[in-house]
Image: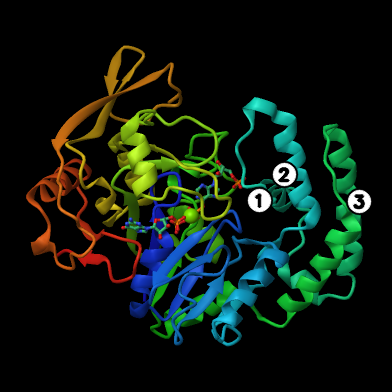
Amino acid sequence: MAVDLLLGLQWGDEGKGKIVDVLTSKYNIIARFQGGPNAGHTLVFNGKKHVLHTIPSGIFHEDTANVVGNGVVIDPVIFKKELDKLAEQGIDYKKSLLISRKAHIILPTHRLLDAASEASKGKAKIGSTLKGIGPTYMDKTGRNGIRVGDIELADWKDKYRSLADKHEDMIKFYNVEIQYDLKELEIEFFEAIETLKTLTFIDSEEYLHQAMKGGQTILAEGAQGSLLDIDFGTYPFVTSSNTTAAGACTGLGIAPNQIGEVFGIFKAYTTRVGSGPFPTELFDTNGEIMAKVGHEFGATTGRPRRCGWLDLVALRYACQINGVTQLIMMKGDVLSGFETLKVCTAYNYKGEEITHLPFNIEEENVTPIYTEFKGWNEDLTEMTEASQMPQALNDYIAFLEKELEIPITIVSVGPDRKQTIVRQ
Ligand code: GDP
Ligand code: IMO
Ligand code: MG
């Protein structure tokens, strides 16, 4: 069986958690392939909201295995908190949660380094979630990292000490004011490592390979979004992993010819949290309405998300890089009540009209060119079938499908599992 992928096509927070949860009943295994606790994936069902950071979004389904892949970075402290929350809700995660031995571990000093790096950048800061993501991936590619498999070995604490000491020297080098008590942080860290050790560690690439051979169905769950990809995103205002389809290959050990459907997920408008260029960003009441109606606050940091119109130049680029086969449109309900909607179809780039994403998309280089649409007033949140959708929404969707040449097969009209319309 092929592995299907679900990826965010914008700057994250598209609604990946919700849709993975909706699709989980069709899969035997859900596997996260990159990112770490910088992610915040929200699921809503039975009137309750759940936010997951590192644990795959299939965890609430009893018969599904949930794999944390080798491409993921794990903070044991945050992971333990997630586990505690699941336990409170009676979720028996011990049998369904499997951790790759090759996943890297975020140390307390990685978090401190993240804070020191951001503080040293001043106004040019990335707007990181400060979860230690960048420093951990730097240690991975620098070949200094500590992996889950290491904590099963006798000498791992020596390895830990020498890396943490080196990090402390690096923190001093930044020459910024960072208050911390490493001894305190280590107590919590080593406690959490013991909890992590109670879980099942696997050679995940072998596990997934055998599962595929045995006919099991697998959905790979992405974190962040394509425009935050380390290679293809709005560098340097990106995260430190490959959030795109190729990241699923390296983050799980899946060959490119084993990939089946690629579900690309996007909001009917655009949001971004943290710094960096955002051509269609709105600074007017339209942006305020999107933020308010869409409750646009980060699921991990609580920071307000910047809002703007849908950007088809960026979306087309993301579809291309990922080989998207099906699109999923989220939060259409948030756009109800706008008299006019705008969609960016091209950029004016240094005086020339272009339809591809150029190297520089900063305000001084790029002005969006918009197509306008008549909005809809109907409340979509109670709708369950495509036949109930207003004509103006159908026109909006038809336009996107024509421009992107990919079908929109699911339309989400609210945060709850049930608020999901499947289109034929
Ligand atoms: P993720 O990181 O991609 O999983 O997305 P987040 O959970 O960070 O952010 C998506 C937010 O939108 C969450 O608060 C969801 O509960 C909410 N949400 C998801 N789909 C919809 C939708 O169709 N309509 C509305 N109004 N909210 C949605
Ligand atoms: P999910 O999976 C939205 C953003 C941060 C910052 C940049 C780098 O919930 O969609 P990092 O902590 O990785 O060093 O931050 O990336 N960012 C996200 N934005 N959703 C996310 O994840 C994000 N993870 C990181 O705000 O701009
Ligand atoms: Mg999120």
Q: Position of residue 69 (x, y in %)?
A: 57, 67
Question: Is the shortest distance between ligand 2 and the CB of mark 1 under 8 Å?
Answer: yes
Q: Is mark 3 on a helix, strand or loop?
A: helix
Kindly report the distance in space between the C-alpha atoms of the residues bearing marks 2 and 3. Answer: 16 Å
Q: Which of 80 and 171 is in front in this view?
A: 80
Lower position in the chain sequence, tag 1 or tag 3:
1
Q: Do the residues labelled 1 and 2 touch (CB within 8 Å)?
A: yes
- Residue 114 is marked as 2
Give the residue type at disc 2: Asp
Q: In which quarter of the image is ligand 1?
A: bottom left
Q: Position of residue 354 (x, y in %)?
A: 29, 24
Could you say which quadrant of the image residue 122 lies in? Answer: top right
| Placement of the N terminus among the 4 image quadrants | bottom left
Question: Is the shortest distance between ligand 2 and the CB of mark 2 under 8 Å?
Answer: yes
Residue designated by label 1: 133
Q: In this view, does 418 lie above or below 34?
A: below
Residue designated by label 3: 165
Residue drawn at point x = 85 percent, y = 49 percent: 180
At label 3, counting other C-alpha atoms closer than 10 Å, the crowd grade (few under 14, some 14-19, many 20 or more) is: few
Give the residue type at disc 3: Asp
Q: Is residue 389 left or right of residue 266?
A: left
Q: Which of 370 and 361 is in front in this view?
A: 370
